[in-house]
Image (cartoon, coloured by chain):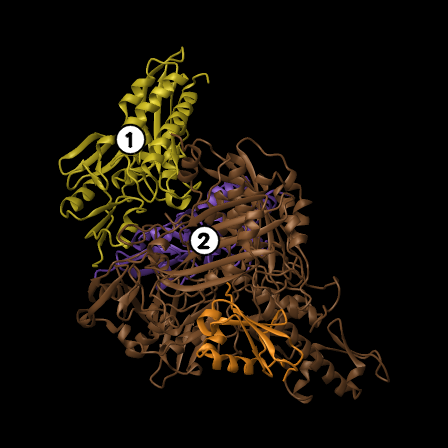
Chain colours: A purple, B yellow, C orange, D brown
Amino acid sequence: MNRNHVNTTINGDATQFLCDPGASLLDVLRDALHLTGSKEGCGSGDCGACTVQLDGEMVCSCLVLAAEAEGRTVATIEGVAEGSVLHPVQQKFLEHAALQCGFCTPGFIVAAKSLLDRNPNPTETEVRYWLAGNLCRCTGYDKIVRAVMDAAAELRQERTPA
Amino acid sequence: MPSPAFHAPDTVEGVVALLSGDPTARPLGGGTDLIVQMRSGRIAPSAVVDIKRIASLSGVRREGDVFVIGAATPCTALKDNADLCAAWPGVVEAANLIGSVQVRNRATMAGNLCNASPAADSVPALVAAEAICVVAGPAGMREVAVQDIPVSPGRTSLASGEFVVEFRLPVRGALEGDAYLRSIPRTEMDIAVVGVGANLRIDDEGTCTAARIALGAVAPTVVLVEAAGAALVGTKLDEEALSAMVEAVKAACAPIDDKRGTVAYRKAMAGVLAKRTVRIAAQRAGAKA
Amino acid sequence: MSASPLRIVIMPPFDKEFFGVERLSIDAGNLFELIEKLDAQGPGFAKIARARVHLAVDGVLETDWTRLLADVREVIVLPRVGGG
Amino acid sequence: MNAPDKIETFRHIGTRPVRPDGVDKVTGKALYGTDFKAPGMLWGAILRSPHPHARILSIDTRAAEKLAGVKAVATGRDLPTLESLVMHVGEGASDIVDVSHNCLAFDKVLYEGHPVAAVAATTPELAREAAVLISVEYEVLPHVLGLDEALADDAPLIREPARGRSDEKPSNIAMDVTMGRGDVEAALSGAAAVVEGRYTMEPVHQGYIEPHACVASWNGDGQAQIWCSSQGHFMVRSLTASVLAIPQSDIRVTPLEIGGGFGGKTTVYLEPVAMILSRKSGRPVRLGMSREDVFRATGPAPGAIIDVRLGADADGTLVAAEVTFKYHSGAFAANDAGAGVSSAIGHYRIANTRVSGIEVLCNRPAAKAYRAPGAPQVNFAVESAIDELAIKLGMDPLELRMKNAAMPGDLQTSGLPWGEIGWVQCLEAAKAHPHLSAPLGPNQGRGIAGGYWGNYGGPSTVNLSVAEDGTFTVATGSPDIGGSRASMAIMAAEVLEVPYEQVRCVVADTASIGLSFVTGGSRTTFATGMATVEAAREVKRLLCERAARTWQVPAEDVEWREGNAVCTSGEKLGSKMSAGEIAGSSIHSGGPITATSALSAQGWLPGFGFHICDVEVDQETGHVSIVRYTAVQDVGRAIHADYVEGQIQGGVAQGIGWALNETYIYNGEGKLENPGFLDYRMPVTSDMPMIDTVMVEVPNPVHPYGVKGVGEVPIVPPLAAVANAVHAATGKRMRSLPMSPDKVHAALHAES
């Protein structure tokens, strides 16, 4: 079987893998690299549970061919915390109980972080539309939106010199 | 289900060579339609040719009086070009209604066009805008009007070995405006039940001097409704003109009943949205309300 | 044993499915014995009782079938409801 | 354990600490059903029927078996022939023969997507390729999807006549439940106002984001392990063992984190098949579903046709109610009719009632529990009709509900009296809420609706052990779907009077804890919580007893205070020993300190909710936006307030989705047209407003902390609350769900 050899950077680490040319980035992350934090809820880009950043932009990793990752940088949920120190979005998800089953949570956190990376002061409407590609069936989104707004507030405070 | 070969050439010629040598090979832009279709087994290309490694195919640039939009430019990147957003807000907004932010960070207007779905969001806006696309193929480059690319659901007029490399839109003057609206059941994440693109020019007096109205999801392909535009030209875009335009729009609808909408609803929405879209385009062109 | 026979109220669908009547009078020391005696009158009832039946003793659901029935007046046999 | 520990003064109950499994879940470390891999594991794939109804004439697996890398192929012939046995281990009773035939079709396929054969191979690609090589010869049979069509005289029969009905004409009626009292016809004919209507909807899906998946490993000695996510790993053990006719103790099921269930993960689809493939190959085998498989082949909630008649006196006293409904049962007998009957009109005091429901077999996937299964459908009809009746009577719809609201002691539809229910308190809280009097904008309307769900108790086992340093581990057998580990830790810490962090809770596998019923029926915080409290009390007693023996004082002279054993009289008065000091020397005081509570919890009470919904309707397009939503609910007592609110908000969102856009769409060939999240339109973030929650606390006197069960109630009222709001905004009564833009538009523009 024809396999592609791919050199890429995942969560800051130079990574090589062999993949079937038709394999998705999500397949490789989960099955070859054992980074199972990115979830497959649909395989068609409709649920956002597999959200990762590709060269800094959030994408559904189920809709990226693994071979496309050659020479690019991939950031997954596993790289969001710095060591044991949680990112403010992660911390606020915990404090606001913005998860119930937690299956959609990694996708939401990567998506929310992507928003706050570029817009540290989003309105509730902006948060809701930005996260519209991430399905959650447990929470009704209320606590998720609150957690993201609160994380934004905290990030703004962190970034403001005292 | 053999796996496709994966290629990522760095020249347009390289893409053409791969596509012409293999009729089932598919160009890969954002992949948001292609990969879904491959996974579902609906298509089984023997090769996938990634066009994103060709530098000239990504991004928006000015060439004289023309905006050139590379075929591999993701929809969200259109928003980064302030001049394009000011000149063609309808096109940029239409492209940024497709799927989610995740999807739009990958999806391209070229892919949206060549997937040849009658419900593609960016296509009515591009057709209304009279956008041209540049097609590369074994015989070199040619220019094609966007509305001439789709021929039926899932089929395009592109010949073997051809692919879209860029879109061209004129730089705009004042007194011109465009808009796109669609009807979906939810607020996001749906395929258009109906989409309407409008593009207008008015004169100093507020009289409409040119108008193009294009409809999505009401026929096998996106349709340009010339009678609808004609109903507006020479008017001050008053209620009477809008009503005549709506009648022309409804007359041009030949939708089907499917899981996403009924014939009756699609016709009704085409009229409602056409009126709303024209009002936004007119406002953008500077017409007094 | 209770002083007088228990009044047994059979709710649908079990009335038609097993007994052909809505009310019975039966002597039983506890609910297990009651089920056994009901099975004698409606063969097959015992087999489905654990999965499909709730028993209410004087108006209160009782899942402990060792519960003694002295001084009890009425047992209602009703369908067990599932949840999500 | 009858009286609450203390009245209203709690150390932990009602607080909002971070859940113990939280960090794993926000960092991607948590292992869900789809994440587990065993060494040497094979990948399975399932071949599913393309037909909604067909007889299997032959299955030729030779080509698949010949493919290099294929290690096992299975068909329905590989499952043992079983005697009919009705079991109640998931949610509602199911016949083990049906469970088996749903895992792998035997002689007939009964719905599009019905599994026919399965393969295991060294890669997922090979497994899928091999599945396609299996050739099945079908004799296509006429199919039936609709309720009325399935009840027609000439309808194709989905299965042989149901058991116990041999004297009746064969039909597709799988279950028939009727309750009520009084003379409905006489009361209706004497009523001052009568409303009647027919309400309809197609099935909807639970929509959990995690597709089903499992890994099974079955050794030659008969012992097996299964790793999977489910709402109950004991349910998985019991059903899998029964389907395979093997001893339960030979299967050890390890629960993985579960990515949502809502009732849909209360049965087995994959596990027995993975077991067969594992036995044949000698390797662990993983089976998983695609999203399309989930929609096509796992339990939707039934669609319905519901007829309602309500009658009232001129003063608004309800005098009669008749509700008659039909629910889709799907390919096998389902259980929603019983709950539908008991959930329809019991929240009102009505002298004359007749509630009757049937389950109808048809060529759809077998209906499965979905959050308050059977209740939202009938509630939609009844609460819409109540709204209509209020208008007819010229009464405020809240006043009409208050006037007739059932109170403790009033009779339920079953004839049993209600216990300590908090329905009236919900109505009063709603009446006092500012939402009810807030001004509305143009094209906006406000709807209200109330509803209830019975909840459940049942078997739970909890083991509470003390580590040498005096910290505590609670092990339960209840999968944690929405934060129950935190709730158990809160309750144990409350009893033990120690910091929350000093108690950690885990979900133990089937070999490590005793039998526990599924996480469903809103039972876990109630029943497993009761076992946790009982175990904690026993551990507390043991700690005191060890201290007493250490001090050589009578046991009754030692009390547990603030996390310490304290001597309360005699020579040693005032002596203290912490849990750590006692446990640290436990090896010299009689051995490790641990307590197990195994109980079948009784005394559960239903929950009631009352919802207020504001919508804005685009009169030109028919789009309905939810602009404000308030949910009031009697929660008994909130143990972890955040997760109680979260349950209410999540249930409301699912109800709104059901009301507005979610629906199964089948084509004329009996194939599902929308088996994906693109066209099965669940609410997305931008569809929703914030959901205000009001927790009313009318404690359950039987539970040590007053718990009633929360999770299911909130999906019951939204359907009617939204419909009543749409009526208020437009004057149109929407009796068919979903209220999608095209249907609302059609109602608004019926003339054109």
**Residue type pointed to by label 1:** Cys
The residue where tag 1 is placed is B253
Q: Position of residue C13 (x, y in %)?
A: 47, 67
Q: Who's the residue at 41% across and 26% down the image?
A: B276
1 vs 2, front mark: 1
Are the residues under badges 1 and 2 in a single subunit? Answer: no
For the question of whether residue A122 can be seen, the reply is no
Question: Left or right of D359: which side holds C84?
Answer: right
Q: Label for residue A107? A: 2
Quadrant location of the C terminus of chain D in the rendered image: top left
Chain of residue at mark 1: B
Q: Is residue D450 above or below residue D112?
A: above
Q: Is residue D525 above or below residue B230?
A: below
Quadrant location of the N terminus of chain D in the rendered image: bottom right
Foreground residue, B164 or B281?
B281
Q: Position of residue B211 (x, y in %)?
A: 32, 20
Q: Position of residue D369 (x, y in %)?
A: 46, 62
Q: Secondary structure at mark 1?
A: loop
Q: Who's the residue at 13% across and 35% down the image?
A: B139
